[in-house]
Amino acid sequence: MFDNLSGRLSDAARQLSGKGRLTETNIKDTLRQVRLALLEADVALPVVKSFIERIRERALGEEVGKSLTPGQSLVKIIHAELVRILGSESAPLDLRAQPPVVILLAGLQGAGKTTTAAKLAKRLIDVEKKKVMLVSVDVHRPAAILQLQTLATEVGASHCASETTEKPTSIVGRALDEARRSHVDVLVVDTAGRLHIDGEMMQEVIDVHKRAAPHETLFVVDSMAGQDAVNSATAFNESLPLTGIVLTKTDGDAKGGVALSVREVTGKPIRFIGIGEKVDALEAFHPDRMASRILGMGDVLTLVEEIEQKVSKDQTEKLAKKLKKGRGFDLADLRDQLEQMMNMGGLAAMLEKLPLPGNVNPAALKDSANEAKIRRQIAIINSMTPAERRFPKIINGSRKKRIAGGAGQQIQDVNRLLKQHMQMEKMMKKVSRGGMKKFMRGMPGGGMPPGMR
């Protein structure tokens, strides 16, 4: 997400290198590039105009401090304006109400409401420790009811059954009664959508909203919908008292302009972003962190939070003790590390949150670390015997041939994996013998980062 915009904004800022001050003359072309970058990213024209004007007002005549170049000064100004346009502060769900707290999801068909309902339920169960019930009132699409029932089982939420012959308002009333009897903390209501906005759909969702009396009404929007997303956001905002926005399919969107547009047009905070198809691929939205991501500064805080939530502490401690005792880093350990990486969305998702130097191309790094390659490596390790995983040195030519055949890969792929394991084993030995300081001194540039000495 935001890959194109991030690259264009960085290029625009670099044009100001060598200038001693930000003036109307030297920022004119730069702001023109920023304007084009925003328009190419599908940001709505009125939003672009006001955004550029605010940047111009703040940038003109601004003195460059001793530690800031004009390019850095402009990036600082753009960052501040991006944070402002994205909502200034994160807005977590307000669950302080008499249970069951009702959360209603509204939006067009195909925006990802049903999947979002399940992702939201999983997050509420895992992070907030809530008892959650899901219900679908989409009587126009039987598959939606069945899909939500299946997803509810997967995420550990209860499900209120519904039929296509029922009225949506009747389903909501029954779900509320069932949720109270079952002492449910949160009831998530998945409403019907259409391919486009029409009077019948809007009236139905208004009636459901009135019957459900939700504490939170979230508008779910496809981040790849472009200008259509802005139009639908405006229509839903006029018909319903929205309390927030959920952006879906952001992992497939390199532009990201919808995030800037929808927030500005509705005035409602973006609560969550969907970052993949898995049921745990839902991130809380933080405007300051997202602004940093857009400008290529990374988002280390979100990465740390993901590690705390998704990386197994037991496995990590077990590996640390094993290395401390001098036992080797075997292929079973490598498989555990690869699987944990996949749980976090793969290396590509992690790279998006890391600040990378200007001369590093994130797209090239993502390409070399794609999900399919990691899956193939796990398949190769799974094709080995326990003895081969524990003692990789016993893997000779005939064993390699058998392992490659079992995993559906080439012998060269097995060789590459064994070489990768050997390199990681050497690195782990350095860490276990000399500690992190000694390991860091051996890295290019040497020394520990500030604050870690």
Image (spheres, rainbow, N blue to C red):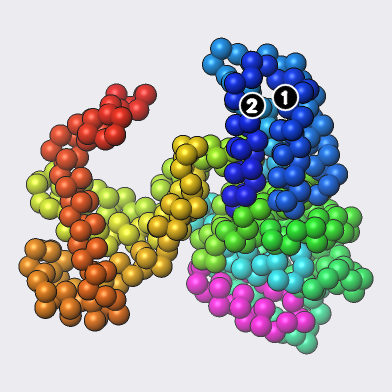
**Residue for badge 2:** 16
Sooner in the amino-acid sequence: mark 1 or mark 2: 2
Q: Residue 24 at what x, y percent from top left? A: 78, 22
**Residue for badge 1:** 26
Crowding near pointer 1: few (<14 within 10 Å), some, many (20+)?
Answer: some
Contact between marks 1 and 2 (CB within 8 A): the answer is yes
Q: Is residue 364 left or right of residue 71?
A: left
Give above or below for 30 relative to 348.
above
Does the segment drawn in magenta span residue 145?
A: yes
Query: 437 or 306: which is nearer to us?
Result: 437
Amino acid tagged 1 = Asn
Q: Residue 99's quadrant in the figure?
A: bottom right
Q: Which residues are magenta?
A: 131-156
For image coordinates 20% across by 76% down, the residue present is 403
For image coordinates 56% across by 12% down, the residue present is 66
Distance between mark 1 and mark 2 Cα atoms: 7 Å
For image coordinates 85% across by 44% down, the residue present is 46
For image coordinates 27% across by 69% down, the residue present is 413
Give above or below for 315 relative to 48.
below
Tag 2, which secondary structure? Answer: loop
Tag 1, which secondary structure? Answer: helix
Crowding near pointer 2: few (<14 within 10 Å), some, many (20+)?
Answer: many
Q: Is residue 216 visible?
A: no
Q: Residue 324 at what x, y percent from top left? A: 14, 43
